[in-house]
């Protein structure tokens, strides 16, 4: 018996990094997942419990259509929404273009709000209605190197709490990952790549922090499973840092 047997789940950003890790974990625990993404070459081995749905999270019309598709697949019911789609955004507060700002907030804030809006009618049909949002440790610190990303993730932490307060019939929580080894770091500028020591699997960077390692998608997937399952039924409206002690070290 899996902890999510029979659960109907939608995961955004399901094809890579943390989203893929959560998708695999949920499927292994018995869930059926409608996975949103744009490139499904990493999901071909997930089996019949994974239902791919191509969706550009920058496009409100495609987001709406994805939830119509999920409703058809799941007979109008959704148990868990996991918002995970994202990308890194780097740059200083005095050196960015308005288009960069819009692109960042459309993906990292507006998309989360739209998915929540379209999920709510489906979640109302579930006795275990649950939303898990992926925020970031960057939302807890003054991250001057990626201020737009930091602002976005701070917004998601507060948005999650507002969602829980506004909809007392469901549980909504967020996870704030620290440095997790995923393809998101491919978007780093050269300065950030050197700081993260990508060529050496983050080894030097990891030594700065208490856990002495960089996180893996599995670290986040275990917490997402806690939130989504009966094990987390008394957890609501909160954010959990999963960062190996990074924020505590930096403060």
Image (cartoon, rainbow, N blue to C red):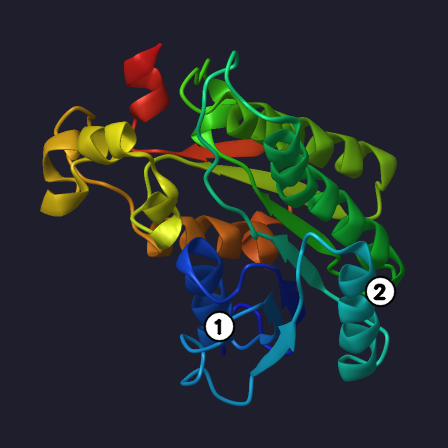
Q: Quadrant of residue 109?
A: top right
As helix, strand or loop, the secondary structure at mark 1 comes to loop
- Does 222 appear above or below 196? below
Task: Pinpoint residue 68: horizontal percent, then vertical percent.
Answer: 84, 72
| Residue under numbered circle 2 | 122
Q: Earlier in the sequence, mark 1 or mark 2?
A: 1
Instruction: Please state if 194 lies on the left or on the right of 148 as rendered.
Output: left
Q: Nearer the viewer, residue 41 or 224?
A: 41
Q: Which residue is depicted at the point 76% across and 69% down?
A: 66
Instruction: Please state if 152 lies on the left or on the right of 14 as rendered.
Output: right
Q: Which residue is depicted at the point 53% across and 64% down?
A: 14
Task: Pinpoint residue 215: horizontal percent, then vertical percent.
Answer: 28, 44
Task: Pinpoint residue 10: horizontal percent, then vertical percent.
Answer: 66, 66
Residue 54 numbered tag: none
Q: Nearer the viewer, residue 111 or 173?
A: 111
| Residue under numbered circle 1 | 29
Q: Nearer the viewer, residue 250 or 210?
A: 250
* Real-space Cα separation, disc 1 to disc 2, in angstroms: 21 Å
As helix, strand or loop, the secondary structure at mark 2 comes to helix
Task: Pinpoint residue 9: horizontal percent, then vertical percent.
Answer: 65, 68
- Residue that sits furthest to the bottom in the current view: 48
Q: Which residue is depicted at the point 34% across and 52% down?
A: 182
- Does 22 appear above or below 179? below
The reply to whether dot 1 and dot 2 touch (C-beta < 8 Å) is no
Q: Is residue 2 visible?
A: no
Count of picture labels: 2
Quadrant including the C terminus: top left
Q: Which residue is depicted at the point 58% across and 75% down?
A: 31
Instruction: Please state if 7 lies on the left or on the right of 24 as rendered.
Output: right
């Amino acid at each position: 018996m899996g902890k999510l047997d029979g659960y109907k789940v939608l995961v955004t950003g399901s094809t890579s990094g943390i989203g893929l890790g959560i998708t695999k974990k949920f499927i292994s625990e018995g869930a059926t997942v409608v996975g949103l993404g744009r490139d499904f070459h990493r999901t071909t081995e997930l089996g019949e419990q994974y239902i791919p749905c191509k969706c550009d999270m920058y496009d409100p019309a495609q987001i709406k259509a994805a939830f119509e598709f999920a409703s058809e697949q799941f007979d109008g019911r959704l148990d868990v929404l996991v918002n995970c789609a994202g990308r890194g955004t780097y740059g200083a507060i005095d050196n960015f273009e308005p288009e960069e700002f819009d692109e960042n907030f459309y993906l990292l804030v507006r998309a989360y709000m739209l998915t929540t809006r379209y999920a709510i009618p489906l979640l109302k049909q579930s006795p275990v209605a649950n939303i898990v949002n992926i925020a970031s440790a960057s939302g807890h610190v003054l991250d001057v190197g990626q201020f737009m990303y930091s602002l976005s993730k701070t917004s998601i932490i507060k948005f999650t709490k507002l969602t829980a307060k506004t909809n007392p019939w469901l549980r909504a929580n967020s996870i704030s990952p620290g440095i997790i080894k995923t393809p998101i770091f491919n978007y780093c500028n050269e300065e950030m790549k050197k700081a993260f020591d990508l060529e050496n699997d983050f080894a030097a960077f990891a030594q700065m922090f208490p856990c002495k390692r960089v996180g893996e998608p599995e670290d986040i997937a275990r917490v997402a499973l806690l939130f989504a399952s009966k094990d987390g039924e008394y957890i609501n409206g909160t954010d959990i840092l999963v960062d190996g002690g990074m924020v505590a070290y930096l403060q």
